[in-house]
Image (cartoon, rainbow, N blue to C red):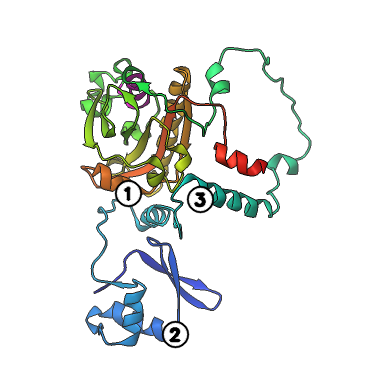
Amino acid sequence: MIINPNGFLLPSGSGLVFWNFEEHRQFELTGKHLQRLIELAENINNYCADHPLDQDFCNTNILIDKPSLTPTWGWDELSRLFHLGTRDIPYEDTPTDEATWTAAYLQHCSDALKQPFPTETFEAMAPASVHLEKPDANYTELPLLTTRATSRVFSRNPVSLDLLSEILFYTLGFIDERALPESTCLPISLRQRRCSPSGGGLNSTEGYLYAKNIEGLDAGLYFYNPAHHALHSCTHQLPDLGELLSGQHFINTLPFGIFLASRFDKLWWKYKHSRAYRMALIEVGHISQTFQLAATHFGLKTWLTGAIDERAVESLINPKNPAAQILFFVGAGHGENEPAPRKLSNLINT
């Protein structure tokens, strides 16, 4: 037995709390529990299966048989705590269909609206000292920025493989024209560049394609190879997207999307401090925006979410490198300019 390494002690108003940040659970410790935990921390051989306090620790996973199978963490404990502590959403009951999700989401929004909305920063500022002219409402210089919008209503119409190929290339592919010259003396893997900026030029973001309705491509999950602009099959066992995206079953008609993962080991290799974890999130954000602009350019509607059942996705893609961690999902297809799922709109209207 060992003390669970994915937990910490936090002072509370009435004592100390053991916070299991991997399972999103907290347990308040009595004085006797705390004293016993100290004894076990000093010498785990003091553990006794018949000891009532040790049984409490086992029942709450404060004591475990062995550590969970997580990759070696290259950064410090601060970034590991944040990553595991925000991994997956701790649902008591994950929605199993669109109707269940709709009711739960509407209740969630209703509860939020009962609280006062935070004051906008500009409302608390002194009167503006400089007033700017807005661009001409009829301008067409940057049409993608004004036409891009999040949609939650998609048809079952397929997307062609050629169109998918272009979107993947501009989102995650290596652009020959942007590659650094050999004179930089860098290895080829560090000279390659994408359309989006990358922390340290490491291209630490990878993409796993969820292909459900692509003409000329078998349904399945694929790894996108940016060096050869190719797809590697991971599995053809394709569950509904709602099962992988925290019960958001309204999106099950989406023809394709990309699970964006970050190769933390690339960032660890160059940056030894935990602030670099932020760069993984920022890079995924850049690539997400590039995906949306590319898909919008080709006439598709886009949708994105961070509500992901990461363990379920990982069990399907079986990543070759355990340091590759799923962070975000972006998807596209033929759809409508409707930001709310139709069942949600109908429920609101009634």
Q: CA distance from mark 2 to mark 1?
A: 39 Å
Q: Is residue 208 visible?
A: yes
Task: Return the x and y of residue 187 as percentages of the image width and height.
Answer: 21, 27
Task: Return the x and y of residue 337 as percentages of the image width and height.
Answer: 56, 27
Q: Nearer the viewer, mark 2 or mark 1?
A: 1
Tell me the kind of residue under disc 1.
Answer: Ala
Q: Residues within 10 Å of mark 1 (few under 14, many from 20)?
A: some
Q: Are marks 1 and 3 in contact (CB under 8 Å)?
A: no
Helix, strand or loop at disc 2? helix
Magenta span: 164-174
Q: Quadrant of residue 13?
A: bottom right
Helix, strand or loop at disc 3? helix
Which comes sooner in the sequence, label 1 or label 3? 3
In front here: 86 or 350?
Answer: 350
Circle on res. 100: 3
Q: Tell me, yes or no, whether the highlighted magenta stretch contains residue 166.
A: yes
Is residue 166 rendered to the left or right of residue 148?
left
Quarter containing the N terminus = bottom left
Q: Quadrant of residue 236?
A: top left
In front here: 12 or 199?
Answer: 12
Q: Tell me, yes or no, whether the highlighted magenta stretch contains residue 119.
A: no
The relative height of residue 169 versus residue 37 in the rendered view (above or below) is above
Helix, strand or loop at disc 1? helix
Q: Which residue is mark 2?
A: 31
Q: Which residue is mark 1?
A: 312
Task: Return the x and y of residue 84 as percentages of the image width and height.
Answer: 37, 55
Tell me the kind of residue under disc 2.
Answer: Gly
Q: Nearer the viewer, mark 3 or mark 2?
A: 3
